[in-house]
Structures are given as C-alpha cells and as structure tokens.
Image (cartoon, rainbow, N blue to C red):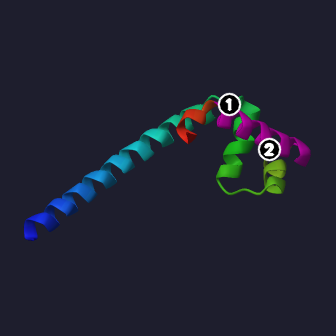
Amino acid sequence: NFYQNKKSFLLKKRGNLERELVAKENMAIIEKEINLLEPELRKAFSLMMNGYKYEEIAQKIHIPLGTVKTNIYESRKILKKRLKSLLD
C-alpha cells in the first residue's frame, strides 16, 4: 500500500511537472508572438494585458479610444491566428 501510494504520488508529481513545462513553453511562444506585433498594436495590447482599462490606455499613449479598441481587436485577431496550434 505504501509503495502504491508513493508510485501514485510520483506519477502525479511527474504529470504536474510536465504540465508546468508545457505551460512555460506556451508562455514563451505567446510572449514571442506578442513581441512580433507591430509596435502600435503591441503597446496597447501589452497595457491591456497589464490590467489597464481602454480609457487609461488611450490617455497613457495619447491616442483616441477608438484606436485603442481597434488595436487591441487587431492584436487579438493576429495572435489567435498565429497561436491557433496552441489552442487545438
């Protein structure tokens, strides 16, 4: 019973480590793709990902609110297309 519990624990731990590695690899890929966005798209998208509201982004980078919304929409569309393989 002890050995079965230990084996089960080790298998779970290994599974968790594998999931953690995959998650880290995926994050690295996502960060790379974000960095490949055009600068004006990347700036608005990065601020949004850091918790800024659209209005705050517009004020911070001195562009109209509509442009912020468009830039974030376009960023999401591009990233979704580029990262489709991670989503499948």
Our reading of the magenta stretch's main secondary structure is helix
Tell me which amino acid carries mark 2. Ile
Residue beneath label 1, please? Answer: 37
> Residue 45, percent across and down?
71, 43
The quarter of the picture where the C terminus appears is top right
Residue 6 falls in image quadrant: bottom left
> Residue 83, percent across and down?
59, 35
Residue beneath label 2, please? Answer: 61
> Residue 49, percent across and down?
66, 50
Tell me which amino acid carries mark 1. Leu
Inter-mark Cα distance, 2 to 1 = 17 Å
In this picture, residue 4 sits left or right of residue 14: left
**Residue 44 in sight from this viewpoint:** yes
Tag 2: Cα neighbours inside 10 Å, few (<14), some, or many (≥20)? few
Residue positioned 62% across, 30% down in the render: 82
Q: Which residues are magenta?
A: 63-81
Residue positioned 77% across, 57% down in the render: 53
**Residue 64 in sight from this viewpoint:** no
Q: Which residue is more in the foreground, 54 or 17? A: 17
Which SS class for mark 1?
loop
> Residue 78, percent across and down?
70, 33
